[in-house]
Image (cartoon, helix red, strand yellow):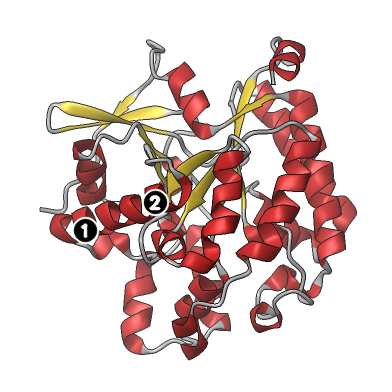
Amino acid sequence: MTQTSSVRSNKPIANLSLDLDNEWAYLKTHENPEWETYPSYLNVVIPRILDTLATRNLRITFFVVGQDAALEYNHHALSQLANAGHEIGNHSLKHEPWLHLFSEAELEHELAEAERYIQAATGHKPTGFRGPGYSQSFALLRVLSRRGYVYDASSLPSFIGPLARAYYLATGQFGAEQREKLNRLFGSWKDGLRPLKPYRWSFDQTTLLEMPVTTFPIFRVPIHLSYVMFLAGFSPVLAKAYFYTALWSCRIFGVEPSILLHPLDFLGGEDVPRLKFFPSMKMSSKEKINIVEHCLNNLTNLFDVKTVGEHAAIVTNRQNLIHVTPSNPS
């Protein structure tokens, strides 16, 4: 690690993270009853991810779902993440993308139980959080602050959220209750006005650092790898060029990018046939990993890549961080 850091010392900073959403979580959100058996692809996908990262000497942040950490058959795969030196974050207990509907008491239970399971499985207590579906609320920020979290990473400053939600609802079979819960999935139009750079939420005479997932400067469209995979379904060449252009745009506008991965970026339709309803799942795992590797090579060539926690530790003492007051529905 020391050698890599010295080589990259003159580059601007970026961070890299992966939301470790499991097969059952996708099935649950699409109201497929098979989710109740908690099918898992972690033992398949985690070795692929770790190999890809180790080749580039990268340490990243894995946001782990508490329910996966609670199941013993996932413990070996999850322990590999910690053993490789990666940061472990909290991605909620049950991966329900409507945390904005939870009360503070419900959120306290959600976070506490997830922390307990994650720490037991990995040996690490999370100090960073990302809500599933970028779910966020004033109540959640308050609970995170009370529980001693260093940062939240649930903000996606993009105008495209409602379009993504409309596509998601149109391609799934949801009941009225489920549609109501998903009403704010991926955020609202006004989220596109949020800052791209890290900032502080200010409330209750305290603050909490926000590490937003980066979107394309000016245009505010996603640049996370799942969106790149969506574009690759039309043209892999276009998708690679899009990501490279987005990275250079970040450099030009002084944005230290927070780049997001998902397990499905490493899995093809042949790996998880039940998830073929996802747009990029018509591609093979070999095709997808080739795109991931190309994008990560571009990222490491242009930026000094760190975990979200490492990036947060660097920016937290900067004097130019803006302060934002979250809206309180009460």
In this figure, which residue is indicated by the disc labeled 1? 109
In the rendered image, residue 220, in percent from the top left (x then y), is placed at 57, 44
Instruction: Indicate the amino acid at tag 1.
Output: His
Position above or below: 47 against 279:
above
Q: Nearer the viewer, mark 1 or mark 2?
A: 2
Q: Residue at x 72, y 62 (%)?
A: 230
Q: Residue at x 39, y 51 (%)?
A: 120
User: Reading the chain from its start, which is encountered first: label 1 or label 2?
Assistant: 1
Q: Quadrant of residue 94?
A: bottom left
**Residue 220, can we see it?**
no
In the rendered image, residue 241, in percent from the top left (x then y), is placed at 83, 44
Judged from this view, the residue extending furthest toward the left is 330
Instruction: Indicate the amino acid at tag 2.
Output: Ala
In this figure, which residue is indicated by the disc labeled 2? 120
Position above or below: 76 against 151:
below
Position above or below: 161 against 81:
below
Disc 1 is placed on an element classified as: helix
Disc 2 is placed on an element classified as: helix
Q: Quadrant of residue 40?
A: bottom right
